[in-house]
């Protein structure tokens, strides 16, 4: 089943507008190819189920024209760069400071 979905997802990424848009969004975020195809593999059964439940013919442009994707406000991950390139310092003592712990009280 997985092998068939993988092959179908590769084809859908080229020919199905909704899956092609998903592929483009994921690729723009820098995701690896196999992960993107995995997302496409998950989308295909959802499309099949929607066509089955609604009992309508498949409309390739349905998702693109009728329903917002819900991802309009999603921001792609930001790359955080270090603010300074300086060396950080630690305490000059090489001996670790002893940790003072309170004894446990189980009387309560």
Image (cartoon, helix red, strand yellow):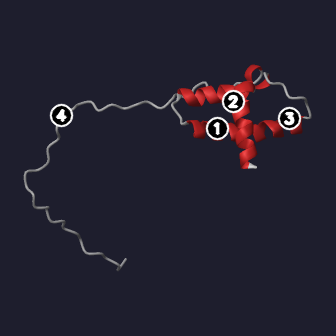
Q: Give SS at disc 3.
A: helix
Labels 2 and 4: the sequence-earlier one: 2
Q: Position of residue 23 (x, y in %)?
A: 63, 29
Q: State yes or no: discs 1 and 2 in contact (Cβ < 8 Å).
A: yes
Q: Single out the residue that lies furthest toward the right.
A: 55
**Residue 101, quarter of picture:** bottom left
Q: Is disc 3 surrounded by few (<14), some (14 to 19) or many (20+) residues within 10 Å?
A: some
Q: Decide if residue 2 is in sight here.
A: yes
Give the alpha-carbon distance from disc 2 to disc 4, as whole Å. Answer: 46 Å
Identify the disc placed on residue 37.
1
- Position of residue 99 relative to residue 66, above or below, is below
Labels 3 and 2: the sequence-earlier one: 2
Q: Residue at label 4?
A: 86
Labels 1 and 3: the sequence-earlier one: 1
- Which-is-in-front pick, marks 1 and 3? 1
**Nearer to me, 106 or 70:** 70
Identify the disc placed on residue 13.
2
- The structure residue drawn at horizontal position 82% and vertical position 38%, both measured from the top left corner, is 48
Q: Give SS at disc 4.
A: loop
Give the alpha-carbon distance from disc 3 to disc 4, as whole Å. Answer: 58 Å
Labels 3 and 4: the sequence-earlier one: 3
Task: Locate residue 105 relative to residue 4 in the image: left or right.
Answer: left
- The structure residue drawn at horizontal position 82% and vertical position 36%, both measured from the top left corner, is 50
Identify the disc placed on residue 51.
3
């Amino acid at each position: 089943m997985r092998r068939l979905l993988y092959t179908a997802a590769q084809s859908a990424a080229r020919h199905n507008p909704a899956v092609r848009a998903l592929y483009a969004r994921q690729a723009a975020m820098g995701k690896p190819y196999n992960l993107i195809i995995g997302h496409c593999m998950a989308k295909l059964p959802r499309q099949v189920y929607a066509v089955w439940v609604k009992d309508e013919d498949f409309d390739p442009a349905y998702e693109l024209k009728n329903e917002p994707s819900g991802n309009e406000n999603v921001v792609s991950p930001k790359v955080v760069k270090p603010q300074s390139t300086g060396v950080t310092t630690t305490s000059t003592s090489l001996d670790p400071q002893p940790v003072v712990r309170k004894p446990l009280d189980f009387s309560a």
